[in-house]
């Protein structure tokens, strides 16, 4: 028995398909002046690259500044110090000439339409790795700043900036510590990694956590999103289930689990809120 994001399943057999590494790979790092331009770039990427579009990563300005500062690296575009949004776009394919032509068409369209203010295309594996290092360094850079209240959210893509601004406003009067907001994620999937850092304080504050999660949940629910995007519900988020599903729905979910796990020994304490009244099962 295993738990996924929104359902449970019993795995009786598994086969692993290991695809070959792509023989062609193109990577570019872009700077955008607004989130509307981020959406425009995403639309052009889907149209221009189609099946070879492999990654479309979003990093906001404060996060990139933190990464470069904590890792003692220069900003990617020194002439544009206050860039609000960065995009890491990559394609995977099997024909280098064909894939490079698609990437060139993609970039030409962006600059012709003024959707980006600057950009770099990797000319070597070393440069590709350096670009991905900036993305992968987001999480450890936040951890070095203070205690991180992390949220893996799913939202309608155009709602990203409004959700973040609403969260900042709601928490602007926090007297418990100074809060910094760092955001990145997989824009193409509507997946936002929202990170709220209590600056220079490395201990969990339960009162602050409860307050943050209230505003995060209300903001996500009000936009038709999900409190869990790619990392599942686990133990921390199962408490939101009664707020998202009707009692009869939760009861059916528990009944299904009970069929395969009557003693509650398979992955206990995950996904379903066991303290909810509909789970008081009578054998």
Image: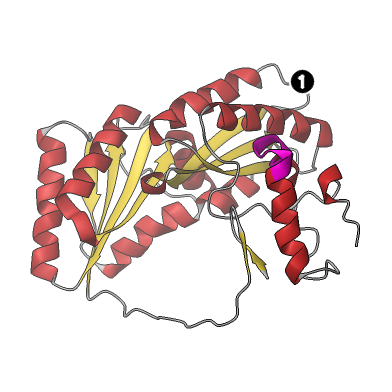
Q: Residue at x 83, y 51 (%)?
A: 279
Residue drawn where x is 8% and y is 58% of the image: 101
Inspect the magenta stretch and tell me whether residue 242 lies in it.
yes
Residue 6: % across, % down: 59, 52
Q: How many marks?
A: 1
- Give the answer, above or below, for where 32 lies relative to 7: above
SS assignment at label 1 = loop
Left or right of 97? Residue 88 is right
- Can residue 173 be seen at all in this image of the molecule? yes
- Taking depth in this image into account, of 156 and 65 the one nearest to the observer is 156
Q: Is residue 20 magenta?
A: no
Depth order, front residue of 67/272: 272
What main secondary structure does the magenta stretch of the protein show? helix
Q: Pick the residue in front: 175 or 52.
A: 52
Q: The C terminus is located in which quarter? A: bottom right
Answer with the quarter of the image where residue 18 lies. bottom left
Residue located beneath label 1 in the image:
175
In the picture, measured across the screen, residue 70 lies left or right of residue 209, that is left
* Left or right: 12 as drawn, with respect to 62: right
User: Which stretch appears magenta?
Assistant: 241-248
Q: Quadrant of the N terminus?
A: bottom right
Q: Position of residue 222 (x, y in %)?
A: 56, 26
- Mark 1 neighbour class, 10 Å CA radius: few under 14, some 14 to 19, many 20 or more: few
Q: Is residue 163 above or below residue 7?
A: above
Whether residue 237 is visible, yes or no, is no
Closer to us: 246 or 92: 246
């Amino acid at each position: 028995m295993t738990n996924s994001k929104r359902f449970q399943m019993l795995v009786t057999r598994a086969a692993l398909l290991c695809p070959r590494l792509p023989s062609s790979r193109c990577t570019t790092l872009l700077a955008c002046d607004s989130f509307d331009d981020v959406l425009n770039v995403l639309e052009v990427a889907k149209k221009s690259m189609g099946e070879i579009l492999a990654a479309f990563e979003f990093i906001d300005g404060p996060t990139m500044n933190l990464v470069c500062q904590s890792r003692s690296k220069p900003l990617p575009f020194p002439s544009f110090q206050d860039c609000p949004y960065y995009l890491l776009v990559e394609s995977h394919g099997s024909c280098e000439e064909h894939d490079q032509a698609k990437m060139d068409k993609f970039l030409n369209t962006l600059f012709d339409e003024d959707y980006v203010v600057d950009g770099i295309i990797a000319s070597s594996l070393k440069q590709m790795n350096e670009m991905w290092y900036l993305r992968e360094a987001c999480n450890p850079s936040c951890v070095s700043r203070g205690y991180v209240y992390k949220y893996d959210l799913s939202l309608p893509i155009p709602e990203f900036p409004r959700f973040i601004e609403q969260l900042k406003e709601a928490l602007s009067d926090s007297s418990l510590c100074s809060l910094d907001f760092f955001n990145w994620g997989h824009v193409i999937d509507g997946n936002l990694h929202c990170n709220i850092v209590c600056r220079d304080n490395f201990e969990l504050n339960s009162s602050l956590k409860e307050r943050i999660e209230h505003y995060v949940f209300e903001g996500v629910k009000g936009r038709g999103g999900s409190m869990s995007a790619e990392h599942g519900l686990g133990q921390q988020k199962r408490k939101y289930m009664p707020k998202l599903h009707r009692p009869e729905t939760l009861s059916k979910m528990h009944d299904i689990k009970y069929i395969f796990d009557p003693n509650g020994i398979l992955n206990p304490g995950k996904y379903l809120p066991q303290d909810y009244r509909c789970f008081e099962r009578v054998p």
